Amino acid sequence: MRKLIASTMVSLDGVMQAPGGPEEDPTCGFAWGGWSFNYWDDAMGRSMNGLDGKDRDLVLGRRTYEIFEAYWPHQSADNPVAQTLNAARKHVASRSLKQLQWNNSTLLAGDVVAAVAALKSQAGNDLQIVGSGNLIQTLQAASLIDEYNVWTFPVVLGRGKRLFEVGAKAGALRLVASHASATGVVISTYVTAGDIPAGAFVQGEPSAKELDRRAKLAREAG
């Protein structure tokens, strides 16, 4: 079984929309496109772990595919990120695209959840989503994402598409790696860890069942 890894850049308040430039995704009047640019340093540029598709197959939504397809094939042949992204096998989720021009790209046919589940069951490289916010929402709800590689930038945007939107499926995560850049970007890797473990800070605090019992007694008493 292959892992499915979601890799994305987010603001401190969880917005992942248009980190790369003003024209990347201005939908719904988003005015902060390019918010990640001034936080990049040389170390981040050299360490694109989790964002460059190295030794992984890519799973992309339509918008992210179109942004990448318009940029990466035209970069210098000695650009290491361009090399890995251009060479990687790319699976694209889209209802509107009919043909894909970027090499090694194929459309995911039919229901995207079933298609990605089928990919995970096959032998091969792990699968990696880059960006593709709408696709992440769909696959997270279906419990198909195994790992999150999140670059958190020290900026608050207030609005925009978020990594976890309202209605995201609840679940626990476990931090397995983390480090910070010189500009304050926290680069973290989380793996899914099952259900959220419940607990109480006050020893002996009554359980929900006990609280319900007490409330019922109070109602019966008058």
Image: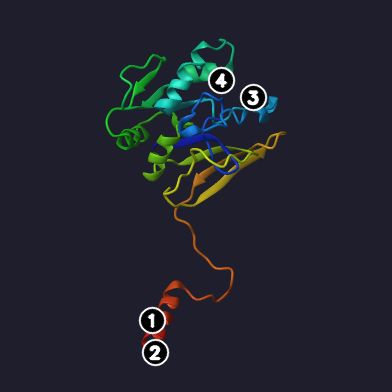
> In the rendered structure, which disc, 1 or 4, sits on the residue that comes first in sequence?
4
Q: Amino acid at mark 4?
A: Val
Spatial separation of the CA atoms under disc 1 and disc 4: 63 Å
Q: Are marks 4 and 3 in contact (CB under 8 Å)?
A: no
Residue matched to label 3: 45
> In the rendered structure, which disc, 4 or 2, sits on the residue that comes first in sequence?
4
Decide if residue 144 is on the left or right side of residue 76.
left
Look at 61% across and 30% down and name the residue there: 36
Spatial separation of the CA atoms under disc 3 and disc 1: 61 Å
> In the rendered structure, which disc, 3 or 1, sits on the residue that comes first in sequence?
3
Q: Secondary structure at mark 4?
A: helix
Look at 69% across and 24% down and name the residue there: 42
Q: Is residue 178 visible?
A: yes
- Answer above or below: position of 190 versus 29: below
Q: Which mark is residue 216?
A: 1
- Answer above or below: position of 73 versus 64: above
Q: Which mark is residue 182?
A: none
Which of labels 4 and 2 is toward the front?
2
Q: Amino acid at mark 1?
A: Lys
Q: Secondary structure at mark 3?
A: helix
Q: Secondary structure at mark 1?
A: helix
Q: Pointer 2: residues within 10 angstroms few (<14), some, or many (20+)?
A: few
Q: Pointer 4: residues within 10 angstroms few (<14), some, or many (20+)?
A: many
Image location (x, y in percent) of residue 164:
48, 44
Q: Amino acid at mark 3?
A: Gly
Image location (x, y in percent) of residue 105:
38, 19
Q: Residue furthest front?
A: 29
Residue matched to label 4: 81
Residue matched to label 2: 221
